[in-house]
Image (tube, rainbow, N blue to C red):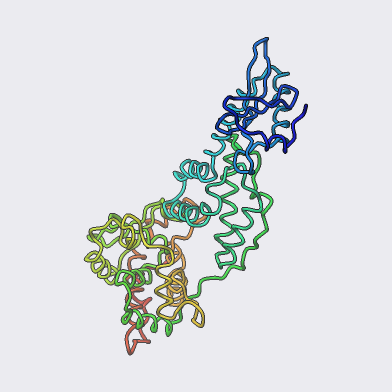
Amino acid sequence: MALTNTHIQNAKPRETVYRLSDGQALWLEVRPSGTKTWRFRYKIAGKGAIFNLGEFAPSKGPGHCSLEMARKLRNEARELVKKGIHPGHDRKSKLREQVKENRNTFQAVAEEWIARKEKNWSAGTADQIKHVFKTDIYPALGKLPIRSVTPQDVLMLIQAVDTRGANSIALLIRQWISAVYRFAVATLRAESDPAAPLQGAVERNRTKHAKALSKNEMKRLLQALRTYGGDPATMCGLELILLTFVRTIELRAARWAEIDFKNAEWRIPADRMKMREVHIVPLSHQAVSILKSLWAMNGHREYLFPNKRDHKRYITATTLNRALERMGFLGEGSIGFSAHGFRATASTMLNEAGFRSDVIERQLAHQERNNVRAAYNHAQYMDERRVMMQSWADMVDDIGKETPNTALNFVKALTFQAA
């Protein structure tokens, strides 16, 4: 006679184990402790065996096996027996697969992908990718099994990042997640890329070119730097990026090992440069003076600008811009000048002063399309670049004076002429 839920619930424990049959080799075993367990008896190759289907409990908590579930599991077990498969062996195999699947979280696969790829990235690129994964991607997707992440999960993440105003990061996140999934598919840990259908889900903002300072704006900035009450190292950083007009990541990640005080040069290694070639920055007297002041503060560290919370890392991408915000040059109601704008400022003023555009572009580390010419220019322009960088520092000093010598023509200091 088939069992009912009422019959099962009313079954009281006895002094010894007894069984209630549901038919088709399924029964409920009732123990003196009150535990009620579903059992299924079967034979394979003439040998009998018993398969434990689970426990019946009054409330549907974790692990609860109802009458309906027991019958379903019994039917599935019978199908396995017909194929000569022990249901217990099948359960253990599936459990091992599930454990393996749980270990293949998105974070585990992503970190494996990063480890494989970072040898081909610059230090700045590697730091940026790791930082974004740690702060944005892992909190949202990191603990999920790699196969369980859906396009909806990825969409919610990139939309949240875009909403907070980080449009370019949102676009990069979709690309990086897609790259992780291509790796996961290639290593048989995923079947598809949930980020692939989302191309275009977040639109790229219109590119805004970095604002260049006018002479009057630069004068105000130089005056603000003199009275800046923030971190002295940050002030040195702003002054140094003004005089050298390197990219912000090139400044932030600068190491003391790159600074040659004797020859007044800063050699930035290729792995930190956008164009993947060593970049030499001739240092003006003013730049050397700033570096010596900075050495007194941070000379015992690896980086010129160590992170205050972790000295083994350098300052974040926002440090310089936050200082500009506090001085009123960036943010709501300001002129909208960011640290990247120092490059545009130097380029504009040096071109206006009459310095050769080839020399300026080379110092900006812009790519030379002709590789032969690039190698020639690298050596040929160095003397001109030294003169130009010192003239630029003098020009900045003059702009910062209370009564600048507006008649001074700095291009007169340039003794080299185009061939």
Q: Position of residue 340 (x, y in %)?
A: 46, 68
Tell me where residue 202 sits by quadrant: bottom right
Tell me where residue 305 sits by quadrant: bottom left
Q: Quadrant of the N terminus?
A: top right
How many badges with numbers are in the image? 0
Q: Position of residue 315 (x, y in %)?
A: 37, 62
Q: Is residue 352 among what the camera can see? A: yes
Above or below for 202 versus 15: below
Q: Is residue 419 among what the camera can see? A: no
Above or below for 261 versus 175: below
Q: Position of residue 263 (x, y in %)?
A: 25, 60
**Seen from this angle, which residue lies furthest right?**
1
Above or below for 293 versus 10: below
Depth check: give the residue in front, 238 or 149.
149
Q: Position of residue 124 (x, y in %)?
A: 43, 55
Identify the residue at horizontal 59%, vertical 42% (top origin).
62
Above or below for 90 versus 219: above
Depth check: give the residue in front, 121 or 170.
170
Horizontal relation, residue 158 to residue 397: left or right = right
**Seen from this angle, which residue lies furthest front?**
15
Depth check: give the residue in front, 90 or 152.
90
Horizontal relation, residue 353 to residue 233: left or right = right
Q: Quadrant of the C terminus?
A: bottom left
**Seen from this angle, which residue lies furthest top?**
46
